[in-house]
Image (cartoon, helix red, strand yellow):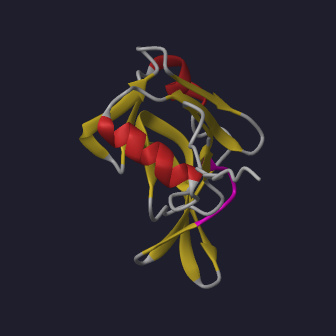
Amino acid sequence: MDRFLLEQRAEVTGNKLVGYAATFGTFADLPGHYETLAASAFDESLARDDVHAFYQHDAAKPLGSTKAGNLRLAADTTGLHFELDLVDVSYANDLRELVARDVLSGMSIGFIPGTDAWTRRDGRQLRTHVRVKRLIEISPVSLPAYEGTSVAL
């Protein structure tokens, strides 16, 4: 009788990250106040800005940009949706592995505030970003500030 040795390997596949870099109507619990994004927050900046994707907000670890064409952004009723075709560099390969294993599953944004409105929620101040002056970057991160963000292969 012949015996066969079966070897199992887990392989990470896919080269595109998708998800939500920000979600509308969810909250970030910041020191001294809450923060949220209105559905209109990115209307102007998406049409105008060259937005970058960085790994963990680190500009020394670029992943793509809207100008390069491998980052695509669109605002829908949920939030700021993204698609990112990963570049072939070591930290992007590490990121792909972390996302595939669900070790890293959140997103964050870097922006310059524009128009905002202040109200109260649960006895604390709530800052609503009505319009973002400039959207600089989006980042897959270990600890996102806003609830509801996501990243997947």
Q: Is residue 29 left or right of residue 31?
A: right
Q: Residue drawn 65% across and 48% down? A: 38
Task: Tell which residue pokes out farthest to the top in this image.
Answer: 68
Is 40 covered by the magenta stretch? no
Residue 120 percent location from the top left of the image: 61, 74
Along the line of sight, which residue is nearer the eye, 36 or 120? 36
When the figure is inspected, residue 111 is found, relative to residue 75, above or below; the finding is below
Q: Is residue 96 left or right of residue 58?
A: right
- How many numbered markers are drawn? 0
Task: Tell which residue pokes out farthest to the bottom in this image.
Answer: 123
Residue 59 percent location from the top left of the image: 25, 39
Q: Residue drawn 50% across and 27% down? A: 45
Q: Residue drawn 54% across and 18% down? A: 47
Say whether residue 84 is visible: yes
* Quadrant of the frame with the C terminus: top right
Along the line of sight, which residue is nearer the eye, 35 or 4? 4
- Residue segment shown in magenta: 22-27
Residue 134 percent location from the top left of the image: 41, 33
When the figure is inspected, residue 78 is found, relative to residue 101, above or below; the finding is above
Is 25 covered by the magenta stretch? yes
Question: Is most of the magenta stretch helix, strand or loop?
Answer: loop
Q: Residue drawn 66% across and 59% down? A: 148
Say whether residue 112 is visible: no
When the figure is inspected, residue 85 is found, relative to residue 29, above or below; the finding is above
When the figure is inspected, residue 109 is found, relative to residue 48, above or below; the finding is below
Along the line of sight, which residue is nearer the eye, 53 or 130? 53
Q: Is residue 79 left or right of residue 67?
A: right
